[in-house]
Image (cartoon, rainbow, N blue to C red):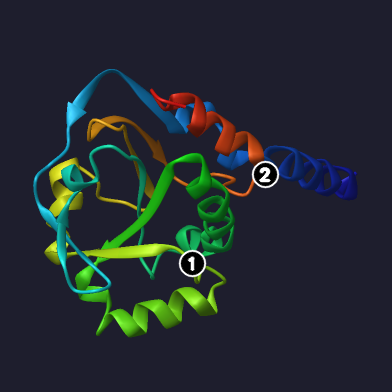
């Protein structure tokens, strides 16, 4: 009987562990778009940008941390998404706390090691942009339309390499 319950517990664990990242409650598309904060983020080239500087582009901004296990796990899939999304007019950017990095070179090498060598990245000085958005845990994705307006968010991880995720993000664009 003891083994029966162990097997039952194991089976339930397997069933409920699949597709945890695909829960629809993790995606929140707003009824009305919102202005994005004006705070600057720093590109790997050292230049500062505001998210409103991306006006005219659909932006998927992923807030992440190098100390966040789920963030690290999804980097390779994010790189796949990046390569597939860019030709579709969707720009993916990574934003991490500046305090985690000694230099842009260190961050680029870190991303390369985790199979995400292509994604452009920015740092958030003192985590101020994340705080302006009310983001206090990672990963957290902000969806920004072509008018530089926030239209929604994805809390937690996603299956970024899955074509259905790309198709869903494409469906959110005003100008496909």
Asked whether residue 139 is in view, the answer is no
Which residue in the structure is indicated by mark 1? 118
Q: Is residue 84 left or right of residue 93?
A: right
Query: In whole angstroms, how far apart are the C-alphas of marks 1 and 2?
Result: 30 Å
Q: Residue at x 81, y 42 (%)?
A: 11
Query: x, y (%) of residue 100?
Result: 27, 75
- Local packing at callout 2 (Cα closer than 10 Å; few below 14, some 14-19, many 20+) is few
Q: Is residue 11 left or right of residue 63?
A: right
Nearer the camera: disc 1 or disc 2: 1
Farthest residue toward the left? 38
Query: x, y (%) of residue 46?
Result: 18, 74
Which residue in the structure is indicated by mark 2? 17
Tag 1 and tag 2, C-beta contact below 8 Å? no
Q: Residue at x 41, y 27 (%)?
A: 173
Quadrant location of residue 55? Answer: top left
> Mark 2: which secondary structure?
helix
Q: Residue at x 40, y 25 (%)?
A: 175
């Amino acid at each position: 009987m003891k083994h029966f319950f162990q097997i039952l517990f194991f089976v339930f664990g397997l069933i409920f562990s699949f597709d945890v990242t695909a829960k629809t409650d993790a995606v929140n598309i707003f009824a009305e778009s919102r202005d994005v904060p004006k705070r600057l983020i720093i590109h790997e080239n050292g230049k500062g940008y505001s998210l409103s500087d991306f006006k005219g582009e659909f932006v998927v901004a992923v807030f992440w941390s190098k100390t966040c296990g789920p963030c690290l796990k999804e980097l390779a899939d994010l790189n796949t998404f990046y390569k597939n999304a860019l030709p579709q007019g969707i720009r993916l950017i990574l934003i991490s706390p500046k305090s985690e990095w000694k230099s842009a070179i260190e961050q680029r090498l870190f991303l390369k090691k985790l199979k995400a060598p292509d994604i452009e990245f920015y740092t958030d000085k003192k985590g101020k942009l994340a705080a302006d958005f009310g983001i206090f845990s990672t990963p957290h994705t902000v969806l920004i339309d072509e008018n530089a307006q926030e239209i929604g968010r994805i809390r937690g991880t996603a299956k970024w390499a899955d074509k259905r995720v790309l198709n869903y993000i494409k469906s959110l664009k005003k100008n496909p």
